[in-house]
Structure formats: structure tokens, C-alpha cells
Amino acid sequence: MLKDLFFRLRSVLRRGTVESEMEEELRFHSQRQLEKYLKAGMSGDEAQRQVRMDFGGLEQVKEECRDARGVSLLETLVQDLRYGWRTLLKSPGFAAAALFTLALGIGANTAIFSVVYGILLRPLPFWDASHLVLLNETTPRVGDVSVSYPNFQDWRSQSHSFAEMAAVNPVKFNMAGSNQPENIGGLAVSPNFLPMMGVRPVMGCGFTPDEEKAGAARVVLLSYALWQSRFGADPSAMGQTIRLDSQTVTIVGVLPQDFRWVEKCDVMEPMGVWATHNDSATNRGDRGDGLVVGRLAAGVRMEQARAEMETLAAGLARAYPEANDQFGVNLRPLREAFSGDVRPAMLVLLGAAIFVLLVACANVANLFLMRGAVRAKEMALRIAIGASRGRIIRQILTESFLVALLGGVAGVCLAIAGIPAIARLIPPDTLAGASVGMNGAVLLFSAALVVLSVLVFGLAPALHSARGNVHAELKEGGKTTSAGARNRLRGLLATSEVALALVLLVGAGLMMKSLYRLLAVDSGFRSEHVLKLEMDLRTAQYDKDPAVIAFWQQTLDRVRALPGVESAAVGTAIPLTDNHDRTDITVEGMPLPKPGSFPHPDIHIVSPDYEKTLEIRLLRGRGFTHADQENVPRVAMVNSTLAQRLFHGTDPIGKRFTFGNEPGRATWVTIVGVLADTKMYGLANPARLEVYVPFRQAASNGMVLLVKSSQEPTALVSAIRGIVASIDKEQPIFRIATMQEVVNASVSTRRITLILLGLFSALALVLAGIGIYGVISYSAAQRSREIGIRMALGAQRGDVMRLVLAQGGKISAAGIVIGSAASLGLTRLMAKLLYSVSVVDPATFAVVAFVLALIATVASYIPARRALQVDPLVALRNE
Amino acid sequence: MKERIELPQGTLDLLILRTLALEPQHGWGISERVQQMSSDVLQIQQGSLYPALHRLERRGWIKAHWGTSDNNRRAKYYELTKTGRLQLATERDSWQKLTAAVAQVLDPA
């Protein structure tokens, strides 16, 4: 078989040699034969004649030899490709239109797929990642929450569904740098984490089981990136020390280059180091930031593991009601944690891109059909002189393939140019270390698209061309019989283009309305001219509260004195992020519920002017002042939701509550103000219970500095850096952004989706318009004789105009009806992306239908105008 | 001149293989040899000889090389391959069975 192919290939590829060899062989034969005849006594002429007669047709013999060598199949392909190439060159307008259309369709798909592949499909850099599960706790009051470390220890010892389990706690460090101090992120992990994940450090050998226990020596693994930037990839970094939070830490290894985690991971330390310095290692009720990763035991399905874990969690809730009442457990594939919440958006966009490709294919099919009409005679002639219909279909499919291939290549080039732009739109948090770009898998996808395109746009025209009635086509001046069927097919294609474009436009319309509604939501604060800068006081000098408070006070005093600063404040939390501390509270005099049902608000530690800087409305009472100090009775502000839920319309000012669920040991806190609700968890999410306490009464090392400026706020950054450096030159400032950027980032997924969906639907709209235009203008041209007669018989311009417009109207009306029906089903798939807009929003549907009808009318008006210019005499004489 | 008969379908390959079993030969040589061996009864049409040679070459039963003919000209020589030899044995076998059977039908004993 292989030999046979090789033989055929040689015959085709080395055609010149093979041909000349054949020539020589046959010549040798003729000469010998000639000599033989001469020897037998024939005259020269007679001998020559006899040789020729013996041979029959020389060319025919050669052709038969070629067939025998198996040249034909491959050679006809080469022939068809050449012929196709020539016909394309002969009609450059057609070729350019088809190529460009396909390039757009395939390019859009390739670009989107590269993102989908990078974020959703590319295998995670872990061994057998499909069996890795992320576990967190849940409570109905909040939703998903972190895992209490003692609970993790019980899960690990009691569960059977998992081969292994490891805790992963995000940690932060201040790293004194060579030039500017930095805040870096890391992970504290159970020592079995790396082996379980199948991750092998490129240097060193990970952690030992002993390093799980509190009291472990301070050691870290560096990320590959940090090893490069900090140590120039020097192997002697092993065993050296770095200063983290002014502690000396020994480097025991380097993580592999492809290691990535949901959060940025610059360093990794064993859990024992974390446990040494964290009360939550032993306090069951304290849920920090930790999550748990488990590897399912062989043969155990996710659902079985979930059932076991739920039973286990229920047991722990009974055993430790104080800490675990109402707490359950949630399991999901690790992959989901990495792809986050962008999955629905990605899939909707991929679907939309496929739709664009379908519209493009419909357009190209239309072009081929139009050309098929022109070439109908050529095809009929070829069939008449003996070409098989199969041969004709093969030839047209080869041409289609050529167009699709060239379109695909152009599309991939477009995608390569466009991918960086799309990748830039995606926030780094969403990427979670994933890289988006061109690679083998993406190219394979593009290749599949090329094949798909050929099937979609090439098959119908090819079958159609071979079906024509030879007799009728060849009749002199005869009306072609297949024209009717061809026109029906073209009308159908244009209709489907309108339908597809409508679905895309509806999708884009719904997204646009969602984003508009979302940005119009009252966020409860004003982002204009506000800058945010984060700081975390982690060095030993800030172990005591007074030092922390002094640092913040000093920073605030000096920042407020900067020219251009209208107000400044510090706070533990800013709106539109979803990382907030929470705790139970007990309102004075309320009936005590079960442990898991206490009010569980977010607790924000803020300085005076917090509400003023963010322009959060003070609904009642007062904001914090300088008088709310360490040694005076404790005060708090609450948000309006908390005031309503816990005080049911009575005035909460002056009411008292205490933190925790043991009012017996209470330090009462008096409510002095009520703030309007702010969107702490994103614009689309409802407000929760919020409590604000003054920063001098509850010192916090990690704070966000908020500065409202009368000018461009980023202009203040260097001045603020200067102030902080003069107070503590080793204190890093990080995540500097304007609040406007924070707002934008919170809707970034929706915004990207809208931009791309808008782009795709605009593309589809234009293509559909071109499609209708093509169909109408072609059929108007075909009907020019009919129009001529009508006008000769006295038809008015308006009548003719109506005639042509009606045809376009029929196409667009059918397309709009079919598209609307399809949209009703398909928009459901994007329900997760929408905000306060119904998937069947009538206004959107109406506007979109109107736009499409308008485009369709314009697209048929132009050919209609041209039809009116038909001179009846000319049209009739053409016959 | 003796009467010549048309070659039945499929016998051409057998004749070529048989001829090449004697020694490597070029196309003209093959047709001469067949004519000679059949006492001028069988004459191969050149028009079918060469396509047959190319077909057999593609099947791997014979292989070709360029050599020098007895009158010192470059000629394309064909020779039997190992599979060709096996093929010849099989075809000869079935040919003999066929002719014996046909003979039996024509002249029942």
C-alpha cells in the first residue's frame, strides 16, 4: 500500500523524468521494430508506416501507461488545483470577495478559539488534572467561604473518596528589594501538595512531611520568574536567604517554569511555617483564605466524593456547632477554579464566531452559485463531451477547497495579528497565568474550519453545477432550466444569512443593554478622581497596634496636606472587590439564634473621611471623627441593608451590638451612623450586611489608601510614594489604580464580550447585507427582459420598484422570522451574562428586526434603482 | 504467414512474467520472445504491452532499470522481483487448471 503510494507519488512528483523515460522506452521499441521490418525487406516508407500502425495512437499508449502507473488520481487533483487557480486569477473580483469573506470568518474563529483554548482547554500543568478537585466550605449566609484548617485536617483523616488532600493558603509578603520594596504573593501548602499535583521543582526537592507541623524552619521555594528576576537564574540561589517581612528565609528550591496557580504565586512555603504564625491553624471557627485541593481516589466519581464530604461536614457541624453550624462543603473540578466565571462568556463568543463563519460561508456559496450560472454552459459542454458528473463535482469542490484554504491562511494571519489585541483586553486575574496565542491546537482548529467551510459553502454549488440539464443549457440562447432552482437556493442562503445575523445582533443587543443597565446601577459611591493604593504593614516594627495606627495617621495627615488632595482616607475594603472580612455580631437584646444563624456582616475598618472620599451618602447620624479613638467607647457605622434587616425600620442610631456570638463577654459597640448601601461585591450583586468601625479602635495592618483629588489623581502617585518612603522606606505600595479602573475591571468580562459580540454582529450584518444585495441584483439582471416588457406595456416605475423590493422584503422577512425563533432558543444560553434584561427582551428584538429590515431594504433598493434604468428596447433586443 | 489469435484477457501478464523468468528483458525483446516461443502464433500488441509493463511495475511484480541493449543502445530492462516470481507460479497454476478444465468441457473423455 505504502509502496504503491510512493510509486504513484514518484510518478507525479518526478513527472518530467518519468515522462521522458516513457518517451525513450517507446522510441527504442519503434526503432527496433523499424530495423526488423527493414531487415525483412520492407522499403523505408512502408516500414515506418507499419510501425505506426502497430502502435496505434502513440499518445493513447502514453496515456494508458500513465493510467497504469496510477498517475491519474493525483494528477487530476493537481490539474484541478491548477485549473482552479487559473479560474480564480481570471475572476479576481470573485476570488477577492470569497477570500476576504472567509478570512474574516476563519480569522474571528481562530482568534476566539485561541483564547478559549488558552483559558478553558489547555491542560493544566499538573499530573492527571482531571481528577483534581477544589474544596471549599459554604454557608447560606454568605455562599462559598474558605476552609477552616482544623476542618481540613478532619476531612483528610476521615474521607475515603480522596487519594490525597492538601491545604493551600494564599500568603503575602513584603520583600525588601534592591530598588523598590515589593509586595509578593505566595502559597503556604501541605508538604504533599507538590507530589500530589505531579509538580517537580526544577531545583531542590520540595518539602518534607515534618514541615507540616508548627515550628517548622522558614524555608521557601521560589517561582521560576522570581528566581530569574531576583537571582538571574543563578543555581547558587539554593541555600541562600532572602528577607521576607524582615524575616530571614532560606531558599530550598525553584518551582518549574510552567507552574501556575489561580492567584499569583511568587514563593511557596510549607504549611508548618504558616501554622507557626497563624492562630487560625488551631482555631476551628476562623476561616482565613485557605482552600483545599484533593485528588479523587481511583474509580471514585465526583458525585460520590461530594456525598461523602457532605456527610462528613454534617458530622463536623454536629461535633463543633460553635464553629461549624450551617457550614457545608462544595466541590468543583480544579479546572473550573482556573477558568473562573469567564466560561459562559467564552462559549457564547465561540458560538457567535461560528455564526459569523456560517454567514461568511453562505455568502461564498452565493458567489459560487452566481459563478455556477455563468459557467453552466462550460459545465454542460464538458458533460456532453464525456466528463462524468463526479469529475465535475470533484473539480468544483477542489476549487472550493482552494478558496477555503487560501481564506484559511489569510484568516490565520488575521488572527495572529488580532490575538494580542484580544489578549490585552482580558484582565490578568482572569487569565490566571494562562497564555493566549497561536499554537498547534489552534492551527488544527483552523484547519478543521477550512474543511467545514468547504462542506458548507462548496457542496451545494458543486452538486448543483453537475445537475444541470445538458440539452437545455446548450440550446442556443436558451433559458437555463437550472436557473430557477439556483435562484431558490440563493434566496434560501440569503434568508439564512439574515437569520444568523439577527441572532448575533440580538445577542449583542442584550449584552449592550445589560452593560448599560449595569453601569447605570447606583453603586453607592463615586469613582471619579479617586485613587487607591494598597499597603500591608508586615514587618516586626508593626507588631503592636499603636505603631500601626501611628503609621496610618501619619500617612493620612501628610497625604491630606498634599496640594490638590480634596480628601483622603484608609480602609480595609473598597467596593466592587469580593474579598472582605466577616464575623458574627450580636445585637443587644436580640433573641439568640443557633450558632450558624447569627447576623454575619462584612467588617470594614475605615478612617474618618472614608464616606466623604468615596462620596457614600450618610443617611443618618454621623461619620467617624478624630475623636473616635482607642480609649473612648467603641462606635460603628452600618449600611442601610443592615439597618433594615436587624432594626426593622426603627432608628438604629444609639443601638448597641457586639462582635461574636457570646454576648456575655460583650464589649458593646454603639451605632453612630448609617451609610447608603455600596456595591461591595460587584455591580450585579445585591448589598449584604456591612459594618464599619474606626481604624483607631481596630488596628489593621493591611489597608487601602483612598485619595480624592481635584485633578487627575494618578499625578499624585509619586508624591504619595515619597511620603510613604519617608515614613518607612521598606514599605511597599501595590495595586495602584483609579477607582474608575476598579469599576471598569469589575465589568471587564461583560465589556469584552460586548465588544467582540458587537464586532461579530456588525460583521454578520454587513455580510448579510452584501448577500441580499448579491441575490437581488443578480435576479434583477436576469429579469431585465421581463422588466423591459412590463415597462414597454406601461408599467410605472413604482410598480417595477415594488416588484424588486418585494423580493428583498420576502428574504428579509423570512430571515427575521426564522432568526427570531432561533434567538428565543439561543439567547437562553447567555442568560448568565445578562443583567436585569430578559433573554426575550421585546425592545431589543424589535430594534434588531428594524435594523435588519432597514439594511435589507437598502441592499435591495440599489439593484431596484438599477432595474429602473433598464431601457425596454435594449432589454428586448438582447434576446 | 501463420494465423494469429487474439490474446484472451489476463494472459498478457502471465506471458510477460513467464518471459521475464528466463532473463531480464526490454519491452521489444519481450514481444519478440513471446512471438518466437509461440511459433509466431501469439503477437503482443505494442499498445497493450507498455501499459501492462507499467502496471506490473506498480504492483511490484517486476522492476525496471536502464541498461545497454545488444546493439549498444540505452534500453529499459525489466526483471522479475521475488513477489513477481511467486505471482508467476500462482498464475501458471491457475492457468493450467483453467485450460485443463476448459479442455475437459470441450472434449469429454
Image (cartoon, coloured by chain):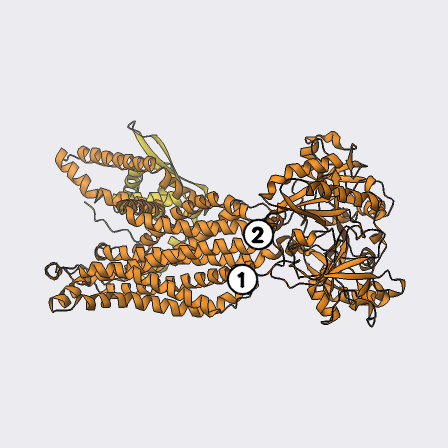
Chain colours: A orange, B yellow
Q: Chain of mark 2?
A: A
The amino acid on which the numbered mark 2 sits, given as a three-letter code, is Asn
- Circle nearer the N terminus (1, 2): 1
Q: Is residue A50 above or below residue A660?
A: above
Residue A699 x/y as whole percent? 80, 49
As measured in the structure, the alpha-carbon distance from the residue carrying label 1 to the one carrying label 2 is: 14 Å
Same subunit: marks 1 and 2 = yes
Q: Is residue A522 left or right of residue A136?
A: left
Q: Secondary structure at mark 2?
A: helix
In depth, the one of A208 and A170 nearer the eye is A170
Q: Is residue A405 left or right of residue A40?
A: right
Q: Quadrant of the C terminus of chain A?
A: bottom left
Residue A753 x/y as whole percent? 52, 55
Q: Which residue is mark 2?
A: A744
Q: Secondary structure at mark 1?
A: helix
Could you say which quadrant of the image residue A772 lies in?
Answer: bottom left
Q: Which residue is mark 1?
A: A517
Q: Is residue A850 above or below residue A431?
A: below
